[in-house]
Amino acid sequence: MTTRTVTFFNYKGGSGKTLGSAALAAEFSLRGHRTLLVDGDKQGSATQCALAAADDAPFPAMVLNFSQFGDKLHRELARHLENYDYIIIDTPAAADSAITQSALLLADLAIIPVKTSPPDIWASRVAVLSIEEARRINRKLKAVVLANAVDRTTISRVVVEQLPSLGLPVLKSCLHNRVAYQEAIATGSHVSLGGRGARKAAAEMASLADEILNMLEEE
Ligand SMILES: Nc1ncnc2c1ncn2[C@@H]1O[C@H](COP(=O)(O)OP(=O)(O)OP(=O)(O)O)[C@@H](O)[C@H]1O
Ligand SMILES: [Mg+2]
């Protein structure tokens, strides 16, 4: 099978890139797909997530830190392609990051997580411009918006309704604001391993993974 590469991407800090990429990589791995989570952020949050796992319950996906590789990311990742079905990249928030640009040039799919607050949707418009630029070179690049940390407030609902105005398809699946996600990240685990309290999170992650796998299979 051809390796598919997915990058989580948004210049807005705290939008859910690390949480989304780690949870998706864990979900894919637990389904039996050979999955690599690439930590492309010098903050090292995805690496910390793997380090936080218990010795007898390692983080479900392989995690490698490529954050120092900058625009050589594609060259280094090429050495791993045959070992994995899916490569998920967590990128930093910095707008001028070489690693983010490199990830957009090699990815099959970019997922832009957007927290459902007005400043988050405003800031995400810049990310959409970068997708348009990357597509001039990487013609296979698909891009979608993921509503993240959705809650029951009116402002969250209004921002969800506004997401299509970003000009990219919006995933049907979304991630609600749930402590279970934070607990999974903090313990190097995955919501599907988290028991009763994590059931809703596990169900929405499963739905997100199904939707993304379908997109990656479409040519
Ligand atoms: N769906 C969610 N439910 C609960 N908490 C969330 C959710 N999404 C993100 N968070 C929390 O919001 C914070 C920021 O998320 P995360 O670290 O994934 O963002 P990021 O885009 O990677 O940030 P940075 O730009 O700093 O790398 C974290 O504390 C994370 O646990
Ligand atoms: Mg991050």
Image (cartoon, rainbow, N blue to C red):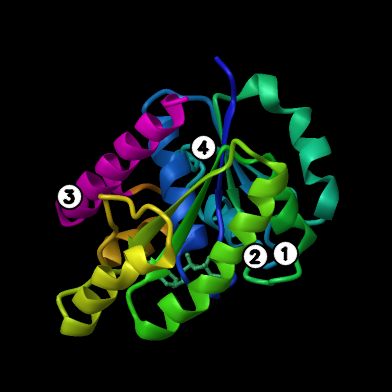
Give the number of the disc on residue 61.
4
| Residue type at tag 2 | Pro
Rendered location of residue 108, percent (x, y): 57, 37
| Residue type at tag 3 | Arg
Q: Residue 68 is drawn in which quadrant?
A: bottom right
- Using a 10 Å C-alpha cutoff, classify the residue at mark 2 as few (fewer than 14 neighbours), some (14 to 19) or many (20 or more): many
Say which label, 1 or 3, has the lower sequence index.
1
Give the number of the disc on residue 92.
2
| Residue type at tag 4 | Ala
Give the number of the disc on residue 42.
1
Q: CA distance from mark 4 to mark 2?
A: 20 Å
Q: CA distance from mark 3 to mark 4?
A: 20 Å
Does the image show residue 123? yes
The one nearer the camera, 11 or 52, is 11
Residue hosting label 3: 199
- Image marks 1 and 2: residues in contact by CB distance under 8 Å: yes
- Residue 218 among those drawn in magenta: yes
Rendered location of residue 145, percent (x, y): 41, 57
- Using a 10 Å C-alpha cutoff, classify the residue at mark 3 as few (fewer than 14 neighbours), some (14 to 19) or many (20 or more): some
| Camera-side mark, 4 or 2 | 2
The one nearer the camera, 38 or 54, is 38
The one nearer the camera, 61 or 175, is 175
**Is residue 48 left or right of 17 when viewed as pictured?**
right
Say which label, 1 or 4, has the lower sequence index.
1
Q: CA distance from mark 1 to mark 4?
A: 19 Å
Rendered location of residue 137, percent (x, y): 73, 44
Asked if the residue at label 2 sits under 8 Å from ligand 1, the reply is yes
